Amino acid sequence: MTQHEHVVAQVQGRMGCITLNRPQALNALSLPMIRALTAQLLAWRDDSQMLAVAIRGSNKAGPFGAFCAGGDIRYFHQAALDGDPALEDFFTEEYTLNHLLHRYPKPTLSFMDGVVMGGGMGIAQGTAWRIVTERTKMAMPETGIGLFPDVGGGYFLSRCPGHVGEYLALTGEVIGADAALQYGLADVQLAASEQAHLWDQLGAQAFADSAAVSGWLENRFAACPKAALSSSPDIEVFFGLPDVPTMVQALQAARNNAWAQRTLALLRKRSPLMLHVVLEQIRRGRGLTLADDLRMERDMVRHCFRLRPGKASETVEGIRALAVDKDQTPQWNPERIEDVTPVQVAAFFVSPWPVHAHPLRGLD
């Protein structure tokens, strides 16, 4: 067994088993955790004895119960104010980890029990078998902290059916297992009480090779009903509109539609600037490869902290209001959705690096 303070790696049979073990923070990712995960995944990738990898989270009572709540946003806040260069390393290395998982040559599983948000989605969406439970609470809620759904969100959200990607990215809505399956963000559902048995079974099987692992999983889940990928009429009507102000106007006009009014209230709480940026991100993401999307997001996240540095950063202010001062009253700039200009949005999509010097230039 290899044990990092917050990442526990064990070998069971010919399975690599990783437990995210920072339950007091809902397994929020730190830079040391990202480095430990990457190093372990690379080692097992190149080890012919290792046939597959499973990843789970933990809660205060033990394994499972929570997967990962995202990146350590309190760290982001302090690092941005301190000018800590490790903040740059965090995102470069996290996005490299995301790419590694999406391109992993051996079967991978994520047990998406409990909270699965932000950076947790970045890990889980890269795995071949995305398992949800009745306790799953999934979201990309970054517009609520003046950020955007990164870790490949522009890639995997934009590939949801219809305009679901725009809806989830803009609102940050929390969804459960059924919606995750319906939207193509999960593969199978398992009762939370059955997770430990499956985890142990994977380590106990005498698999001959990685193909045998995949075949065993196919048989194991053959009886599980397959959800038909679909959106909803409301999502398609409102989130297929050309821009955020038009969406908001249409939602506001739908006074007798309770869903529309609740969705409008959600959008009004988010960063107006980042709503515009995120819509552009998702729609660009549909035409990008994973590597190009991650490079775009690496540009965007640098701008989140550097276009307006320190306390002036939209992201720093959003995190302050949610997680530091906890006053829940971010002072967004601009204050209104209608006041965001195309120039402000376009700035996020200009790379601060030449192609040959981009920190993610090596991704294929």
Image: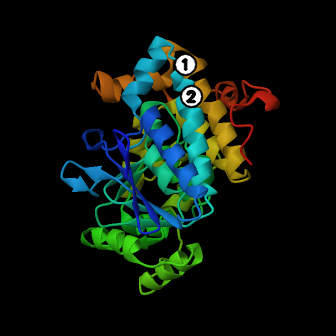
Dividing the picture into quadrants, the one containing residue 49 is bottom right
Depth check: 54 or 160 in front? 54
Determine crowd level at label 2: few under 14, some 14-19, many 20+ residues with C-alpha closer than 10 A: few
- Amino acid type at image mark 2: Asp
In the rendered image of this protein, does residue 210 appear above or below residue 70?
below
Depth check: 240 or 13 in front? 13
User: Do the residues under discs 2 and 1 have CB atoms within 8 angstroms?
Assistant: yes
Residue 289 image offset from top left, x and y in percent: 72, 52
Please name the residue shown 66% across and 29% down the image.
348
Determine crowd level at label 1: few under 14, some 14-19, many 20+ residues with C-alpha closer than 10 A: few
Q: Which residue bears the numbered disc 2?
A: 89
Residue 345 image offset from top left, x and y in percent: 65, 30
Depth check: 171 or 178 in front? 178
Instruction: Inspect this view and state whether residue 151 appears.
Output: yes
In the rendered image of this protein, does residue 244 appear above or below residue 134?
above
Q: Is residue 98 toward the left or the right of residue 191 in the image?
A: right
Q: Secondary structure at mark 2?
A: helix
- Amino acid type at image mark 1: Pro
Q: Secondary structure at mark 1?
A: loop
